[in-house]
Amino acid sequence: MTIRYLTTLGSFLRTTSLILGNTVLLTIVCLAIGEWWARSVAPPVPEATKITVENQHAAYHPWAGYRNTPGFRYELGNWVPVVINSWGWRGPEPRIERSKAVRRALLVGDSVGFSGWGGREEATVGGALKRALELRTGEPWEVINTSVGGGFSSASLGTLAHDGMQFRPDVVISLNGINDILVLDERATILRFGEGLFKRSVYHKTQVDIGSIFDPRTGKIQQLGVLHQLAASSALVRLALPLFAARQAVHPFEGKTAGRFAPTSEGYSTANLERLDGYINNQLAMSYLAEGSGAKFVGFLQPYFSLKHKIVGEADKAVIKMTEPSLLKWMDDVYPVLRSKLQAAASKNPSYHYVDLSLMFIREQVFDDLAHMKFETAQLSTGNEMMASRMADEIVRVLYAGKALPDWRQSHIPGTPHDWSEAVYLSANPDVSTLIAKGKFKNGFEHYRAAGFLQFRHSGFPGWNEQAYLEDNPDVAALIRSGAFASGYEHYLKEGKSEGRCKGLPMRWIEETYLAANPDVAAEVKAGKYSSGEEHYMKLGARENRRGGFSGWDEEGYNIAYGDVRNAVINKLFRSGIEHYLAAGAVEKRNLSLGLSSFH
């Protein structure tokens, strides 16, 4: 009996183990086949540790929610067009202290204001706005661009309140709108409503996601669950994970218009239009904050690709193909409501200067997608230039109300750099006027490009006038006589600039053209008598009215246009692009680089 029982048990165990073994083996084979299949069809796992263009704008920030990653460098081959400064903003490192002679604008916004990655800084909205403001006012400007991709007005308000206003801007500029209307998207793909006490507050999806994994009060990071840990190494688990993950609930917002319009099948809705009031309230809050600090506030409603109003060209058809038709139609439905709300708010609040740019581009084919401006080249974005010009007109109207400004349209030649003065060039070079009268050149700028630059003539770009500076500042003349300074130029660099002593647009010293124009100085610098050509100019050259130091050369523009020159400079075959141009580029008939052309 016992033997029979043991025999039966042994047979059962052998059979069970065989079944289990085969099941495990079959499961392993199925999982291996499934994993092989999943890896062939699943999208590649996005880079999670390396900071890239795709994820750099999600750097956690305690009050703005997120912003660009400080120190991020966007490398385009051997060219770095964008560097994020320590504040998480694009452009040069801003200083809180400001010069008395320089006007300051603070730009808040989203990716339209950020302006993409493929162009030089001067061709972005911020760069184009700086040039347009300087052209219209004759004063130096600084534009601090705090825009961040995916941003919206709540993030702009947080940035302005906690960081921006300490820079004491003359004007705050908001360029928002396109992301804020996505609060009507029932799928909550970008914006979500809060919960509890904050159920009426709008948050970016990134903020919610970050908040679920990181507690800024304790610094504690939530650990991934088992499924997410498996998904990190298994494509099959990644594909199956959505079947097990809990669906994100969208906070129900019961509004006055709820139920009046049903959401479309794509999720775009014109229901709950009072949700747009959050954007209007944020605009008003920024205007109160600016006005209370002595600054002006101008809120621009962004341009968008209007399917209803636009005259569609061939380039526009490509944009339409890349965009959901339902989204374009929805934007045409929502924008009129948003305009009316903004106009009503501006009429009741003097601090809020509202400007509608939404239908600015009707005939022009400037869109890269439904809202962003394309770059025709790394140095030109027609859309950014035109938008910045319109913005500058409105800013000047608000900021300089009642003040007389020179008519720049009468004095400026279209297509020349914004800081070129035709009158200054012709005054310094009287023979050029004769050549123009004979029809050999259309204007002084054309002469300077064709001949004047390589003749090292006094240019029409902002330069130094020693005599005028001393006449305007007799105390400086006394200091020079006492031996405290060798020239007015030395005083200006060391003290006068920060004191706002010299009016007009900023000067740019070009060392190479000064030495080329003055071989005797170059020899003295080589012999060690002066550390640089500019030191010579401070000590002697300014009083001698030497030429060449303010030639207007655009180093970055030349190196962008000619990749072989950029490589030669990187490989130390030349110290700079201007050295290449003077040694070889002019003979090779390469284009002279004198800055970006301005738009009227």
Image (cartoon, helix red, strand yellow):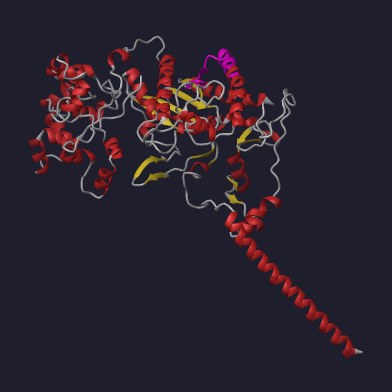
Based on the picture, tell me whether residue 368 belongs to the magenta stretch: no
Residue at the (62%, 41%) spot, across then down: 208
Query: Can you name the residue that lies furthest to the right here?
Result: 1
In percent of width and height, residue 482 lies at 13, 26
**Horizontal relation, residue 85 to residue 539: left or right:** right
**Horizontal relation, residue 200 to residue 530: left or right:** right
In percent of width and height, residue 485 lies at 16, 29
Residue 364 location, quadrant = top left
In percent of width and height, residue 414 lies at 30, 19
**Horizontal relation, residue 572 to residue 547: left or right:** right
On screen, residue 8 above or below 339: below
- Residue 229 visible in the picture: no
Query: Can you name the residue that lies furthest to the front here?
Result: 314
- Residue 1 visible in the picture: yes
Instruction: Magenta stretch: give its range.
Output: 341-361
Please name whichever residue, 129 or 405, is drawn nearer the observer in this view of the structure.
129
**Horizontal relation, residue 506 to residue 223: left or right:** left
On screen, residue 93 above or below 393: below
